[in-house]
């Protein structure tokens, strides 16, 4: 009797609603995705090659080198992050996250920040993973704490820091402590001041179509995230290369003499250079004219806020989120680096 009493027009309206809720319609990659995948890998290099043939000059050659090096350096970790994101969506049940993370968001934030220790990736990998966690029901504050800590405190980064600063274990410990503190504070700040309208809803790939295997869902999520984030990675790399070439090296000597200006300058330099977190310690160790606290700020700010990361965040979570979150993260990271570095270094 209930079937006859329900208005017939409700049935056709239910399907689109469900499709929009689980995000499967929006998550579909284009059918010509292999061509886009090849284009994302080949076209930037081809464009730089053609420009280089038509316009000569050391500055242009340096720009090409920096742009390609940043892109090539970050691309493997972007692949790692998008593959991990697709695997989380396809193979990990939602109940796993509810069991691992505390139910109270205040407690979930430091736990998620500490979980970043186990992911050997850079900021390019953390953005799609954080987006996937939000789509799986994890509190955004906890996902953002993981986003900030994963590229800064994983074993690969800490090992690289120990190698870059031999005989200085206090630098490794200061980087670990300052990065974890920044990630935790930013997670709590989002709980306190964050607004839902700043955050673009996460695209979910978890809906399985009739007859679709989990590997098919994994492939769909991986294609969507990689094609979406790859373009923003290239844009960020081009911006970083432009700054690297435009600013003369003499500017470095101007700021190194002031304790306050040196910290601010190296923090800004880390944002603009957009060096991968696995390599930034070697650059910091080479800046011998700057104080240890300033070099610590360079290593803490860089993995959390840089041009390519801002571009990836804007493309994934929205421009309103990226602007506010990046600005707040920069301030918190600088303050905590100065505080912890002043005590330990």
Image: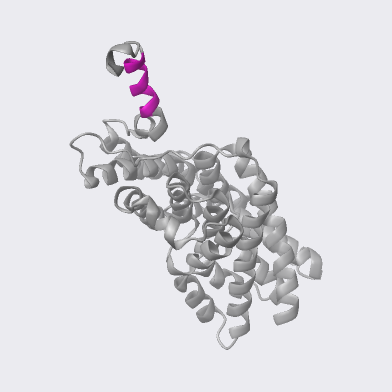
**Residue 140 on the magenta span:** no
Query: x and y percent of residue 237 in the render?
Result: 51, 49
Report if residue 169 is visible in the image: yes
State the residue in front, 210 or 131: 210
Residue 314 point in image, percent of width and height: 55, 41
The one of 74 and 67 positioned closer to us in this rendering: 74
Picture quarter with the N terminus: top left
Residue 155 to residue 195: above or below: below
Q: Which residues are magenta?
A: 10-19
Q: Quadrant of residue 169?
A: bottom right
Residue at the outermost bottom position? 167
Residue at 28 percent across and 35 percent down: it is 35
Residue 68 percent location from the top left of the image: 44, 52
**Does residue 225 appear to the left or right of 109 in the view shown?**
left
The structure residue drawn at horizontal position 49% and vertical position 71%, both measured from the top left corner, is 157
Q: Is residue 49 left or right of residue 55?
A: left
Camera-side residue of 45 and 114: 114
Q: Residue at x 61, y 58 (%)?
A: 106
For the point 23% across and 47% down, the residue is 215
């Amino acid at each position: 009797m209930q079937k006859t009493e329900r208005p017939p027009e409700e049935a056709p309206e239910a399907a689109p609603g469900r499709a929009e809720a689980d995000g499967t319609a929006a998550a579909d990659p284009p059918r010509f995705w292999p061509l886009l995948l090849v284009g994302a890998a080949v076209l930037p290099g081809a464009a730089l090659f053609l420009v280089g043939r038509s316009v000569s000059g050391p500055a242009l050659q340096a720009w090409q080198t920096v742009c390609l090096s940043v892109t090539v350096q970050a691309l493997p970790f972007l692949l790692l992050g998008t593959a991990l994101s697709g695997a989380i969506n396809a193979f990990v049940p939602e109940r796993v996250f509810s069991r691992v993370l505390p139910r109270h968001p205040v407690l979930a934030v430091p736990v998620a920040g500490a979980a970043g220790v186990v992911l050997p990736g850079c900021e390019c990998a953390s953005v799609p993973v954080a987006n996937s966690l939000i789509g799986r029901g994890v509190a955004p504050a906890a996902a953002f704490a993981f986003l900030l800590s994963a590229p800064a405190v994983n074993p690969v980064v800490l090992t690289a820091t120990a190698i870059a600063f031999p005989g200085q274990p206090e630098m490794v410990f200061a980087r670990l402590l300052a990065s974890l503190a920044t990630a935790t504070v930013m997670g709590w700040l989002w709980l306190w001041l964050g607004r839902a309208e700043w955050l673009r809803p996460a695209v979910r790939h978890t809906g399985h179509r009739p007859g679709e295997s989990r590997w098919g869902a994994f492939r769909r999520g991986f294609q969507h995230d990689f094609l979406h984030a790859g373009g923003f990675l290239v844009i960020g790399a081009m911006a970083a290369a432009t700054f690297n070439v435009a600013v003369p090296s003499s500017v470095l000597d101007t700021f190194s003499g002031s304790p306050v200006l040196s910290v601010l300058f190296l923090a800004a330099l880390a944002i603009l250079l957009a060096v991968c977190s696995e390599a930034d310690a070697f650059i910091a160790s080479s800046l011998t004219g700057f104080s240890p606290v300033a070099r610590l700020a360079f290593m803490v700010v860089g993995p959390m806020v840089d041009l390519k990361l801002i571009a990836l965040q804007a493309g994934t979570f929205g421009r309103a989120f990226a602007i506010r979150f990046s600005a707040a993260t920069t301030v918190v990271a600088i303050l905590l680096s100065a505080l912890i570095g002043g005590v330990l270094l």
